[in-house]
Structures are given as C-alpha cells and as structure tokens.
Image (cartoon, helix red, strand yellow):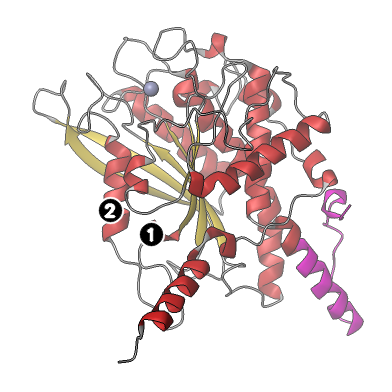
C-alpha cells in the first residue's frame, strides 16, 4: 500500500503547512518612514462634504433608489480614480418578509487589484469587506457606523494601496518576478448588499448578499491551468477575510474573536500601537482600539455577520467589530453627526497600513532594489527616480 499511515500523516501535515496563511505571507513589518507616509483621508471622509463618505450617508435599502445611487458612487469612484481595479457585480434576488412575495434585488460589488501577470484563479487575495445596505427600519436610517463609514474607509484603503502597488507590479513584471505564491498577492474589496434583516434577524432574514456570494464562490470552479491549479474556487483564493463593521464611534473596543487568526489580529494591533507611539493617529482613547494582544479580554462571543457564510466555506476571518456595539447601534442617531471623525480617520490609516504590510510591500521593495542593483551592475540603465523617500528602509 502506497500511503502507510505515518507517511500519509506527514504528507497531510506538509499540506497543512503549505496552506497556512503564515506560509503565504512572509511577514515583514513596514518601516517607520513607510508608516509615516500612510496618508489620512482628511476631509475626503467628511460626513457632509467628503467625496468618499457623504454620498453613502443616505438610506440605501435593497430595491430602493438609494441602493442604486450608492452603487453608482462606488463604481464611479473606481472607474474614474482606480482604473486598474476590476469591477464585478454579483447579483441575486430573494423574497424578504416585507416584499409581499416579490423578489428583491441584491448586488454585491467586487473591486479587485491583482498582479498583471496572474491568470484567473492564480492570485491569493487579501479580502477587505463591509456591507453597504442600510436597515429598512427605522425609516430614514442611514447607518453611519453600520456600515457607511467602514465602506468609505475601504475606499480610502483602495486609493492608498493602488498608489503603491501599481508601479511595483509593473516593475516586478519587467524583471520577470511573479509566478510564485508569495509574489502572486492581490487585494479585493467586497462591498456587500443585504446584510441587514428586514424584520427580525433570522438565518433567512439577514446576510442576503454574503450568502449568495459565498455560495457562488464555493460552487464555481476556477479555470484549470496546467501550472496553476492551487485555488480550485474563488472562495479558496481568499487569504484572509477582514470584515469591518460598526466602526466610527469613539473609543471602540475590538476583541480578537478567532484563535486561528489571532496572529493577524496581533499584526493589526501592533500597527495601531506603532502608529500611536509615532503620534500618527489623532484619537486618544483610554485603551487602544485593538487591546486584545493576549486574547484575554474574554469577549469572544460569536457575532452573526457577513463572515459566517464564508467561514462555513473554510475561509479565515479577522472580524473587526467592537464589543460592545456602539451606543447608537440600530438607532436614528447612527448618523454622520454622531461619528467620531478622528476615530474614523485613524481606522482608515490603520487598515491601509495593514493592507500594505500584508501585501508584503517591504519584502517586495527589498527584492526589487536588489534586482535593480544587479541590473545596474550589468550596465542596464533603469530609471528609479519614482521611488519615494518612504520606501527606504530604516
Ligand atoms: Zn446593522
């Protein structure tokens, strides 16, 4: 028999090692100067006039004109400012307790930035997620923390990441880099529809968008390819599902919910503490936003949210949601006026830094500089004047 027990076990553990997120991300912390260069969204995330947030602060219930307006806002922003991101719609319909037997439309939006050399299904994707729909009741509810502000934070993250990866991908391609697991990292932003219950939260009346997307991504195989068939479905391409929800109130307390992603939580928390130590954040809460470095706060109760259908499909989840929920939760006071803007801007910077660190920016820069130097030695002239100060190692 070919697979004797011990060898099949070691084969299995080797496979598990290969598939662990640790193997995918050889983590190198961002340098101090890189952290300093992470921009704040500033007035762009102002609730009244900011082009990232203000257009989202309207009622946007599935099947209403507000839903369409907000979808157009997202698509227009990527089309006009971030043309290298692919835009994908994932549509579904469902009956709800208030739709009188009619099917309501739900549309998830997927914005993706992959290395240009990857084939479909080849890249592993850091997946940043927030829901954009708002609650049916109370009428006029705009859900600023739930989750207009998290959506706007992710738009800021897309801008920051794009600025850094674009030239990097291009240069790596010129150098013939890529094609290895570490190099084939991309990022996708999921803006999900239909998270809220229409009547009362049940398994059927909630998570309409995430359930439809998780089902589609589990069931549709990636195209086979002779060399790259590591990720069988879009679901398996998700290296980490980082879900933002209920963010924007002052002094949030976000515990580490899942032991298997506690290491990623620690990286996020470390970014917060490094940025605070460097006085790069505006808020001054009595405890950090992410205080659970040792996973000892005890607030680890599972919370029902958009991660559940993906977790059911085996995806690793980092849930960034405060416990307890903000005071304004599901009330009319969850509006632009009640957002704590220093907190909103700080979250935007922390998540942007995390994404850049995850995409292994420091490692890629080091490799790229090394390759540049060896090319220079063979007297090939390559222009590197675009490299900003912030890329230099400390
Ligand atoms: Zn809600």
Check the image and name the residue furthest to the left: 101
Residue 3 x/y as whole percent? 35, 86
Q: Is residue 169 left or right of residue 208?
A: right
Residue 118 x/y as whole percent? 52, 69
The magenta region covers 365-394
Is the shortest distance between ligand 1 and the CB of mark 2 under 8 Å? Answer: no
Residue 330 quadrant:
top left
- The residue at which mark 2 appears reads as 216
Q: Dot 1: within a 10 Å radius of its alpha carbon, few (fewer than 14), some, or many (20 or more) residues?
A: many
Q: Is residue 187 left or right of residue 329?
A: right
Q: Dot 2: within a 10 Å radius of its alpha carbon, few (fewer than 14), some, or many (20 or more) residues?
A: some
Q: Residue at x 84, y 48 (%)?
A: 390
Looking at this view, is 162 or 287 the one in front?
A: 287
Mark 1: which secondary structure? helix
For residue 163, above or below residue 103 = below
Residue 100 x/y as whole percent? 10, 22
Residue 95 quadrant:
top left
Look at the numbered discs 2 and 1 and tell me whether their residues touch, using CB distance below 8 Å. Answer: yes
Looking at this view, is 251 or 50 the one in front?
A: 251
The earlier-in-sequence mark between 2 and 1 is 2
The alpha-carbon separation of the residues under discs 2 and 1 comes to 9 Å
Find residue 234 and name its label.
1
């Amino acid at each position: 028999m070919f697979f004797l027990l011990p060898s099949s076990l070691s084969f299995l553990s080797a496979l598990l090692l290969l598939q662990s997120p640790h193997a995918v991300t050889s983590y190198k912390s961002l340098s101090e100067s890189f952290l300093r260069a992470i921009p704040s969204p500033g007035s762009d995330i102002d609730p009244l006039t900011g082009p990232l947030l203000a257009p989202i602060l309207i009622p946007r219930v599935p099947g209403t004109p507000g839903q369409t307006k907000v979808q157009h806002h997202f698509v227009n922003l990527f089309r006009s400012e971030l043309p290298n991101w692919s835009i994908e719609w994932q549509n579904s319909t469902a009956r709800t307790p208030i739709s009188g037997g009619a099917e309501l439309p739900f549309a998830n939006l997927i914005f993706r930035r992959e290395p240009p050399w990857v084939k479909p299904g080849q890249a592993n994707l850091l997946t940043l997620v927030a829901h954009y729909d708002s609650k049916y009741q109370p009428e006029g509810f705009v859900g600023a923390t739930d989750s207009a502000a998290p959506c706007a934070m992710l738009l800021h993250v897309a801008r920051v990441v794009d600025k850094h990866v674009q030239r990097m991908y291009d240069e790596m391609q010129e150098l013939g880099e890529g094609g290895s697991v570490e190099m084939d990292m991309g990022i996708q932003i999921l803006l999900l529809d239909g998270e809220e219950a229409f009547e009362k939260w049940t398994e059927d009346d909630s998570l309409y968008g995430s359930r439809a997307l998780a089902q589609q991504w589990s069931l549709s195989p990636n195209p086979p390819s002779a060399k790259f068939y590591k990720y069988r479905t879009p679901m398996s391409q998700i290296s980490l599902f980082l879900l933002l929800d209920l963010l924007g109130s002052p002094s949030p307390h976000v515990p580490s919910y899942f032991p298997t992603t506690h290491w990623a939580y620690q990286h996020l928390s470390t970014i917060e503490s490094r940025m605070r130590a460097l006085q790069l954040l505006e808020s001054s809460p009595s405890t950090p936003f992410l205080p659970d470095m040792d996973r000892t706060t005890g607030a680890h109760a599972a919370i029902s949210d958009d991660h559940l259908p993906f977790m059911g499909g085996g995806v690793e989840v980092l849930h960034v949601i405060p416990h307890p929920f903000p005071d304004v939760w599901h009330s009319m006071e969850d509006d632009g006026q009640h957002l704590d803007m220093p907190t909103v801007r700080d979250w935007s910077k922390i998540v942007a830094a995390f994404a850049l660190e995850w995409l292994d920016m420091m490692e890629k820069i080091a490799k790229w500089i090394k390759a540049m130097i060896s090319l220079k030695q063979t007297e090939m002239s390559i222009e590197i004047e675009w490299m900003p100060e912030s890329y230099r190692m400390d």
